[in-house]
Every structure is written in C-alpha cells, then in structure tokens.
Amino acid sequence: MSLDPDTVLFTPLEDPESVQVLSTTIPPDGSSLIWEIECQKTGAVPVVISYLTIGLDSLVTYTATVNARETDLNLDAELALRNFSGQTYPLARVWLDPDTAFATQILDQEIRQFPFSVSGDTQITKRFHWDGQTMPHDPENMDSYAGVPFGYQLGLPEDLSGNDRDLRGGKVRLFLEDSRGHQLFTGEDILPFLPGGDTFFLKAGCSRDLVITKRRMKSEKTGIRRNDKGVIQVFDQTITDRFILKNTGDTSADIRLIDRIPGHWEPVNMGHAYTLEDHETLRFDILVDAGETQTFDLTYTVLNIFPARFAEFNKVTRP
C-alpha cells in the first residue's frame, strides 16, 4: 500500500501528554507502519491511527458536439477513477460534487469509467480570437499563414449556477456536425474548473477566412525634455496603429481582438470602443460581416520614455 508520509497520524485517546511519538517509519514496500513510542505510564492506552493513501485519483473528460449551425453545444462527461494505491476498496464512496455521490468497488491497479450528464443548457458563441502578442501583424506578406484561431465561448447560465452546474477541469474533445449529421473531430482543449456563470474560450482550430493586419502608421517624439547641455533626457511618443480586418468568408465573424500598449500611456484618438483589462491590455469585440473589410486607427501617447543610455539608471530594483 502506498501512503503519504505527511498524513500518518498516531493520536492517543487517553492521557495524550504521557505518550510521545519519537519516530515513524514506513518500509519501502509499504506493507507496515513502525512507530517508536515513549510512554511515561504503564498500562493500555487506546489510540487512533489514520493516514491517506496515494495513487488514488480521478479525472474528467468531456465530449463536446456542436451542431451544424454552430449555435448549440451538447456536452457529455465521463469520470475516470484510477486506483494505483496498492489497496482494493470494496465499497468506495465517490463525490462528483457536494450534492452528487455514489458507491462503487474498485480493485488495485484498476481504472473505472463512469459516464455522467451535464444538466442544463450550455451557452456558446462562435468567436475568432486574435492576440497581438502571438499572432503575425502582416500575414498577407508571409510565405505561410495558419489563420486566425477560432472556437466557442462556453458559458453556464448564472440563474442555474450552483454546485450541480460547476464543471470540473478536464480535457475536452470537440466534434462538429455536418449537414448530413456526421460528426467531424476538430480538436482538443483543456477546460479549467468552470463555476456557474463563468465563461471559457474553447479553441477549435484556425481559419484563413479572416485576415487581420496591424501596421504602425506614425511615430513621433513629443514633449521632449533636455538637460542643460541639450541632451534628451525624457520624451513622449505619439503613435498611430492601424488595424485592417478582412472577412473573406460567407458568414459574419465575431472577433475578440487583444492588443497591448506597454508603459504609461494615454489615449489620443481611439478609433474603436475597447475594454481595458489591465493597465496595458485592450480588448476589442468586433463584428465583421461576410465579405466586409473594417479599418480603424488607434492613436495614443506613451509617456516618459528614457533614452536607452539612461534607461538602466531609471529601473525599479526589487530586493
């Protein structure tokens, strides 16, 4: 039997101050526990011995099937209970969540699988996801272009939230139905623990129907500050970036575009509404119709830039 040595407890039920555990030994084969004990009194003392085994765990896998119109998602789940603890459990009680439990037998070296349903409706929205930190900025001039990642924004309705609506983390295998009802495997993703009311982007693949280009149109130094010798010490920089979103597909595209502006900055003329996720991360939610091309500019000023030769003296050092 495999034990977690940090969980082995030897607890006297009577006169605990007179009983002292000097050492606990677990032989390599895990077949026994050996304690060295000093007791100041003679006689019998009842004790409780407790421990946790290792090698007993579980994982959840999901099968997600999206209909041909990509409007609904059917989610099936399967629990895999794995026992490599060295001990057989004739009546193990398993909790899927605080409100759902069942009893089963599981032998040593056995893996048992239990399908279970995910109740309620699972809301999805097909979405393209472009992140300027990882995606190419000029894909049309590249020799090869994989396309823009797309997937489904998976969410659980808030009005049904609760322990029975939370989703455990696990691997999701994604299938897409075609017009004839056949299921096509599109990919896999890892779902984190998802409480009711939260959302998660389930990546399905990449599409070349959408081309997103980011270009630096203008960069100008402003607010220059010099020392007595006329050497530039600090300056601001006004920048204009242009985004071109081209949808060559035959359906509209719901796009989530992520861009980052490092440093201390302030907006000048932002050509599209955005949500500021943190001090440097901007999120744009854009709908581009089939065959449409949208263009917008972002003009902003990055403040208090130090020339390279002074930057090393103006960094914040941490202890």
Image (cartoon, rainbow, N blue to C red):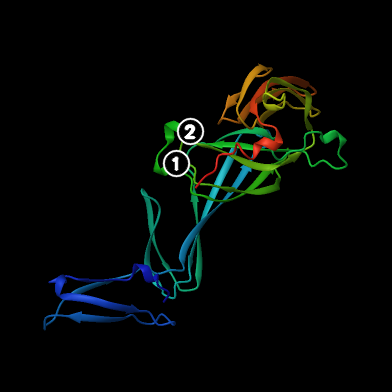
Number of numbered discs overlaid on the protein picture: 2
Q: Quick one: quadrant of the N terminus? A: bottom left
Image-based side of 83 in relation to 276, left or right: left
Q: Which residue is mark 1?
A: 165
Q: Which mark is residue 157?
A: 2
Quarter of the image for residue 305 reads top right
Image-based side of 144 in relation to 305, left or right: right
Quarter of the image for residue 48 reads bottom left
Q: Secondary structure at mark 2?
A: loop
Question: Residue 243 location in percent, x, y?
Answer: 75, 25
Q: Residues within 10 Å of mark 2 (few under 14, many from 20)?
A: some
User: Which of disc 2 and disc 1 is earlier in sequence?
Assistant: 2
Question: Residue 62 location in percent, x, y?
Answer: 56, 50
Examine the rendered structure and indicate whether residue 169 appears above or below residue 23. above
Question: Residue 278 location in percent, x, y?
Answer: 55, 31
Please indicate, yes or no, whether residue 273 appears anywhere in the rendered image. Answer: no
Proximity of marks 1 and 2: CB atoms separated by less than 8 Å? yes
Image point (49%, 46%), residue name: 193
Image-based side of 232 in relation to 276, left or right: right
Q: Which mark is residue 289?
A: none
Residue extending furthest toward the front: 229
Foreground pick, 54 / 185: 54
Q: Secondary structure at mark 1?
A: helix
Image point (63%, 19%), residue name: 267
Foreground pick, 288 / 40: 40
